[in-house]
């Protein structure tokens, strides 16, 4: 196995040398800025806490595994591909961000059923002018660090991309077009006379819905589960992530980090391509 160490800052030689000893590797080699490979590494229980203490992300990757082994990357939107929770920012236009954000956080931790949490949040938006959605997109929506680098590398390798979100089509479709993603699916907010009604149209795209879309697109592309990577940050992503050959917890809740193949706690989304360089 190769042990990949990466950070947002220069990695001190003393940290690398300590990890080399823990992993019983013979050397470390730099493969990108602040990214190192330790070949022929062995697992050790002290590696995880040591890396977390020093704000290092790590991952054990089988020798020879690379982006060429994959054909589809499935991404959550809010707090994964983008830096905000769209519904929280919409609620801010109503002066209700604290109330809505509290429900969002509980749902992401897995304490509230997602579909129920979404209904409870959306109903608070009743009467809001639909132009508030465009304001959130124009004024507040930002990609997470490393997103464009990651997507560029995926395109270079011919890997298809699916954005699947418990959020809203208003945002996923605009992001899909802007970033030239291949597929996108999300929920639709109902509007009437230019106002939000406080309801979601159709069946809510929840955790199972995300997993189902992953399988649907994977089968359309004639890929095996081992050729899929799924990325998310909340409990609503776990079913989707379980259907992928590799799952990435991006700046995620503890329940997600514990179940993912790899956790990126500090670096940006380009940490995915560094793992599989």
Image (spheres, rainbow, N blue to C red):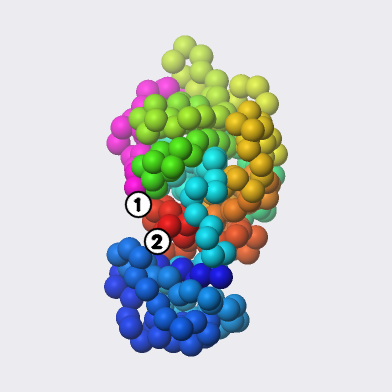
In the depicted structure, whether residue 187 falls above or below residue 69: above
Q: Which residue is pictured at 60% across the width and 45% down the height?
A: 227
Instruction: Report x, y in % for residue 71.
Output: 54, 40
The quadrant holding residue 225 is top right
Q: What is the magenta range?
A: 125-149
Query: Which quadrant does the C terminus fall into?
Result: bottom left
Q: How far apart are marks 2 and 1 (CA)?
A: 8 Å
Badge 1 element: loop
In the depicted structure, whether residue 244 falls above or below residue 3: above
Q: Can residue 101 be seen in this view?
A: no
Task: Identify residue for label 1.
Answer: 145
The front one of 262 and 66 is 66
In the depicted structure, whether residue 93 falls above or below residue 107: above
Could you classify mark 1 by the number of other residues whose Cα lies within 10 Å: few (under 14), some (14-19), or many (20 or more)? Answer: some
Does the magenta portion include 61? no
Q: Can residue 57 be seen in this view?
A: yes
Q: Which residue is pictured at 56% across the width and 70% down the height?
A: 1
Instruction: Report x, y in % for residue 269.
Output: 42, 52
Task: Identify residue for label 2.
Answer: 267
- Badge 2 or badge 1: first in the primary sequence: 1
Badge 2 element: loop
Does the magenta portion include 147? yes
């Amino acid at each position: 196995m190769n042990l990949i160490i990466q950070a947002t800052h220069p990695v001190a030689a003393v940290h690398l040398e300590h990890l080399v000893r823990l992993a019983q590797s013979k050397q470390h080699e730099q493969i990108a800025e602040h990214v190192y490979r330790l070949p022929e590494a062995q697992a050790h229980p002290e590696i995880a806490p040591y890396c977390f203490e020093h704000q290092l992300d790590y991952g054990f990757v089988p020798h020879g595994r690379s982006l060429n082994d994959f054909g589809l990357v499935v991404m959550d939107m809010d707090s994964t591909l983008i830096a905000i929770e769209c519904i929280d920012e919409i609620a801010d236009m109503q002066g209700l961000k604290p109330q809505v954000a509290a429900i969002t956080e509980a749902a992401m931790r897995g304490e509230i059923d997602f579909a129920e949490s979404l209904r409870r949040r959306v109903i608070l938006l009743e009467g809001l002018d639909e132009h508030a959605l465009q304001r959130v997109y124009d004024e507040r929506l930002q990609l997470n660090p490393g997103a464009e680098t990651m997507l560029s590398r995926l395109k270079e390798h011919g890997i298809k991309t699916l954005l699947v979100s418990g959020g809203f089509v208003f945002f996923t479709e605009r992001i899909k077009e802007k970033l030239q993603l291949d597929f996108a699916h999300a929920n639709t907010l109902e509007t009437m006379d230019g106002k939000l009604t406080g309801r979601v149209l159709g069946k809510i795209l929840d955790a199972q819905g995300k997993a189902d879309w992953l399988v649907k697109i994977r089968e359309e592309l004639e890929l095996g589960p081992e050729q899929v990577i799924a990325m998310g940050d909340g409990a609503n992503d776990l079913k989707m992530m379980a259907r992928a050959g590799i799952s990435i917890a991006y700046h995620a809740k503890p329940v997600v980090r514990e179940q993912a193949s790899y956790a990126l706690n500090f670096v940006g989304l380009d940490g995915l391509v560094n793992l599989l360089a």
